[in-house]
Amino acid sequence: MNTGGKTLEPNELAHFILDLISDKKGADILLLDTRPVSFIADYFIIATTDNERQMKAIADDIQKQLKKHSLLPLGVEGTPPSGWMLLDYNGVLIHLFSPAMRDFYRLEQLWERAPVIVRMQ
């Protein structure tokens, strides 16, 4: 990501996204370093949203703020009504869940060998 001539590394991008999610009151935000256990992405961000409207607001804000820095998602999957969304920013994958879907998918358990970098309650 380019900010004023400086390109952010994936870990800096991940922390920038964490702040965006936190600002929109996302809950139980988790940043996993998946580099030691997967080639899919460098980092996974997992967060819970209270409702569909909040999930949409968070996803929209992430895309809006990153677009300002000429960074577009490689893909967006899921919808707020489904209870799950994935935003793929190459080295950083963002998973937004309703409480029920987060409990159903249990990504923290699936990726339990990935070091936890940040956990925000």
Image (cartoon, helix red, strand yellow):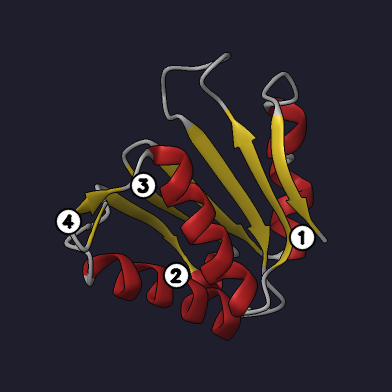
Mark toward the start of the polypeptide (1 vs 3): 3
Q: Which sits earlier in the primary sequence, circle 1 or circle 2?
A: 2
In this rendering, the answer to whether 13 lies above or below 59 is above
Q: Secondary structure at mark 1?
A: helix
For the residue marked with disc 1, what is the amino acid? Answer: Ala
- N-terminal-most mark, 2 or 4: 4
Q: For the residues marked 3 and 2, what is the alpha-carbon distance in whole angstroms?
A: 11 Å
Q: Which residue is mark 3?
A: 88
Q: Residues within 10 Å of mark 2 (few under 14, many from 20)?
A: many
Q: Nearer the viewer, mark 1 or mark 3?
A: 3
Res. 57 visible in picture: yes
Say whether residue 101 is left or right of residue 11.
right
- Residue at image location 51% in from the left, 20% down from the top: 35
Q: Amino acid at mark 4?
A: Gly
In the image, farthest residue toward the bottom: 53
Name the residue at 66% across, 79% down: 51
Helix, strand, or loop for circle 3?
A: strand
**Measured along the vertical axis of the image, is residue 95 above or below residue 114?**
below
Residue 100, labelled with which disc?
A: 1
Callout 2 amino acid: Ala
Which residue is depicted at the point 68% across and 78% down?
25
Whole-number angstrom distance, CA of label 1 to CA of label 2: 18 Å
Q: Is residue 85 visible?
A: no
Residue that mark 4 sits on: 5
Residue 22 occupies quadrant = bottom right
Q: Give yes or no for contact between labels 3 and 2 (Cβ–Cβ under 8 Å).
A: no
Dot 2 corresponds to which residue?
59
Judge left or right: residue 39 versus residue 58.
Answer: left
Q: Residue furthest front?
A: 5
Q: CA distance from mark 1 to mark 4?
A: 41 Å
Precedes in sequence: disc 3 or disc 2: 2
